[in-house]
Image (cartoon, grey):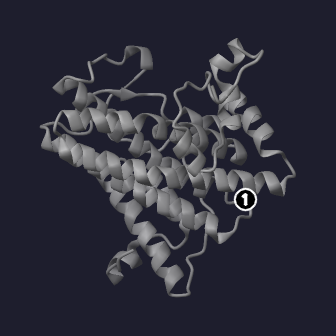
Amino acid sequence: MTDLPPQDLADLPQTLAECAVAVLNTADGRAKTALSKRCAEAWFERRAAGDPMPVGQGTPPDTPARPDKPELLNPRDMPRRRPGSPAGRIALLHAVAHIELNAVDLHWDIIARFTDVRMPIGFYDDWVKSAAEESKHFNLVCDVLESLGSSYGALPAHAFMWRAALDTKDDFLGRLAVVPMVLEARGLDVTPGMIELFRKAGIENAVAALETIYAEEVGHVAYGSKWFHFLCGRHDEDPKDAFHRLVQRYFHGALKPPFNEEKRAEAGIPPDFYWPLTEEHHENTAGFDINA
């Protein structure tokens, strides 16, 4: 992390939870991610100086502030575009930017929302680092959009991106199960295909942005798995059973293969966590082989 000018440090909230709430209450995407990165830098600067920022407490909004654009639509009302066309590639990048902006808020929200649960300082290190990386990802994708003559907000976006956060706002373990271990893990499955699509189109800045996202998302999923297992151990719960129970409660629908089993394993999620939650498993329970 780079040093911040003294006036920037003085302007920031004095606790990590208050920083998180400030990010959540910032509407503009570029401004939100700039504040996110400044808060992360301040956290790590003070940690390195031996004067850690207090975690404190905050009151996060149920729904974070959002810019006027993009228009948020029901999934069934979203326009369909061919991903191989120029318009389709822009639409795909716009969807990725929207996901990354929501990820910034999700990572700060988990910090502010569950301060009543005593956690090691390493938990906050992991999620602050993730929030800073998601901020970088949003800006990388926005830069690519702008190089292609578009921008974030130029197209409609998915209205249900925040649903998992609302569903799990009172369930810390449920939040860890559904957001990093299901939603972010899905990114590990689909991003290689997106990288290949943009590589074939010769859009090298998109390839570079997606490769950065792909490399760093493994860590975000791993943080989710690590702290999920930590809390399961604290409450003497079997992690696999707890994961199945919580995903069935909070995730709307079955998990869909194909799965990037190598990267999921690297992130600490073995196949017996996710394969039993697929439609294929329920349709073929008798004799089903997860290694087939």
Q: Nearer the viewer, residue 178 or 166?
A: 178
- Residue found at the very far right of the displayed protein: 236
Q: Is residue 24 shown left or right of residue 82?
A: right
Residue 114 vs residue 182, the one in the foreground: 182
In the visual, does 198 lie left or right of 117? left
Q: Is residue 289 above or below residue 53?
A: above
* Nearer to us in this view, 158 or 242: 242
x and y percent of residue 187 in the render?
A: 46, 39
Provide residue 160's location: percent of width, then percent of height.
Answer: 49, 28
User: Which type of secondary structure does the marked residue at label 1 adopt?
Assistant: loop
Q: Position of residue 210 (x, y in %)?
A: 32, 45
* Residue 252 location, quadrant: top right
Dot 1 amino acid type: Asp
Regarding residue 69, the answer to whether it shows in the image is no
What residue is shown at x 35% (from left), y 80% (from top)? 3
Q: Position of residue 87 (x, y in %)?
A: 19, 25
Q: Mark 1 highlights which residue?
A: 116
Report if residue 109 is visible in the image: yes
Left or right position of 20 against 194: right
Q: Please rate how many residues cluster around mark 1, counting C-alpha atoms within 10 Å: few if below 14, some from 14 to 19, many from 20.
A: few
**Which residue shows up at 29% across the image and 49% down it?**
209
The residue that appears at 53% across and 32% down in the rendered structure is 259
State which quarter of the image contains the N terminus.
bottom left
